Image: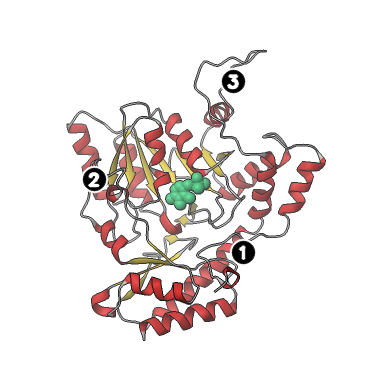
Amino acid sequence: MSDENKIWLSSPHMGGSEQKYIAQAFAKNELSSFGDNIIEFEKNIDSYLGEKTKAVAVSSGTAAIHLALILSGVGYGDEVICQSFTFSASANPIMYQGATPIFIDSEMDTWNMCPIHLEKAIQDRIIRGNKPKAIIVVHLYGMPAKILEIVSIASKYNIKLIEDSAEALGSTYLEKKCGTFGDFGIVSFNGNKIITSSGGGVLICKTEEDKQKAIFLATQSKDNAIHYQHSEIGYNYRMSNVIAGIGRGQMEVLDKHMASRQGVNEFYKNLFKNIKGVSILIEPNANYKSNHWLSCILIDEHTSGITREEVRLQLLANNIESRPLWKPMHMQPIFSKYKFYGNRFSERLFNKGLCLPSGSNLNKSEKDRIKESLLKVFE
Ligand SMILES: *Cc1c(COP(=O)(O)O)cnc(C)c1O
């Protein structure tokens, strides 16, 4: 079958005004990392988050996490706590800093970092004389973590909190946006996220001082001198003003895309209502609001009579992409030697879970194809 008919997990979905902002950058010859698009894009993010944040547009979500770690004072030999159930980009920047990751299991309600295991881990690390320098919590698939509990643990032990909201732009807990609870937050504008700049990220700072320091680091740490002088290691992490134009255009359709993804989630909820052995990730209660970046299911093969992998292969045979849930970091060859605190709930998620096509651009006939295919599988 041709790729033309392929139904993807989450593909870019332009709003319409992106090219206008790109054209403006060309018209003004603002083709580097300075210009109106960057300034306006950062303003759009700040006003959308609504918490007096100081957004910094950078080249990727991964770069934003790296900068957040540097600004949190994480250096060689430090320990950093990280949610195990996540994409590797949450954890890789810990290694860039020569620091050591400590992985924490997930809880069942949101699939994100378990506050109980988090506190146990902090206490254990302190006893061993290695108080962690920072905590990286993730709002996976758009589902807010138990963020207030995690904020209170971080502040009780006076540890910096970094929120990886790469997948959760627009998600809220008690109507406060994900990414604004921690000392730093990050958002990704990679091509598969809820909105995209074709690649890019934002670091969410709380102070102008942190924002200026982040921009300094992201633009090669140039000292204030007439020649090029450097007193610190710098990075080439700033977003291009052309790319920021795409981000600007996409911010205009974020609410619309969220509504569409909510609709996709409803579609799956209805579809699986009467299918035994399949459960879908939904908000634990009304305090949580997910952007439903991806709709995810768990398949209990004993009840449903079919494995996760059989479902995936059936969908693939119908030219429909689906993907196992993230493989936890403590199970990854590169990270398996690091300490893990938990009950291995995230391993169960990985073994049973599947992400289903969730794009904001899924049309009626594509939804019909998915439905037909899934009903056939579970028949
Ligand atoms: C996509 C993603 C990132 C990385 O963002 P990039 O912009 O691709 O660098 C980090 N964490 C999570 C959870 C992600 O899904």
The residue at the far right in this view is 27
At label 3, counting other C-alpha atoms closer than 10 Å, the crowd grade (few under 14, some 14-19, many 20 or more) is some
The residue at the far bottom in this view is 379
Which element carries disc 3, helix, strand or loop? loop
Residue 193: percent from left, percent from top: 53, 55
Q: How many marks?
A: 3
Which disc number belongs to residue 256?
1
Q: Which residue is mark 2?
A: 340
Which disc number belongs to residue 222?
3
Horizontal side of 117 relative to 50 (left or right) equals left
Residue 157 shows in this picture: yes
- Give the Cα separation between the discs numbered 1 and 3: 40 Å
Residue at horizontal 50 percent and vertical 73 percent from the top: 319
CB atoms at circles 2 and 1 under 8 Å apart? no
Q: How is the image coloured?
A: secondary structure
Q: Quadrant of residue 91?
A: top left
Horizontal side of 23 relative to 346 (left or right) equals right
Mark 3 sits near ligand 1, with its Cβ under 8 Å away = no
Amino acid type, mark 2: Phe
- Give the Cα separation between the discs numbered 2 and 1: 39 Å
Question: Who comes first in sequence, dot 1 or dot 3?
Answer: 3
Can you tell which of label 1 and label 3 is closer to the viewer? 3
Q: Nearer the viewer, residue 88 or 284?
A: 88
Amino acid type, mark 1: Lys
Which element carries disc 2, helix, strand or loop? strand
At label 1, counting other C-alpha atoms closer than 10 Å, the crowd grade (few under 14, some 14-19, many 20 or more) is few
Residue at horizontal 48 percent and vertical 80 percent from the top: 371
Amino acid type, mark 3: Lys
Residue at horizontal 39 percent and vertical 30 percent from the top: 97
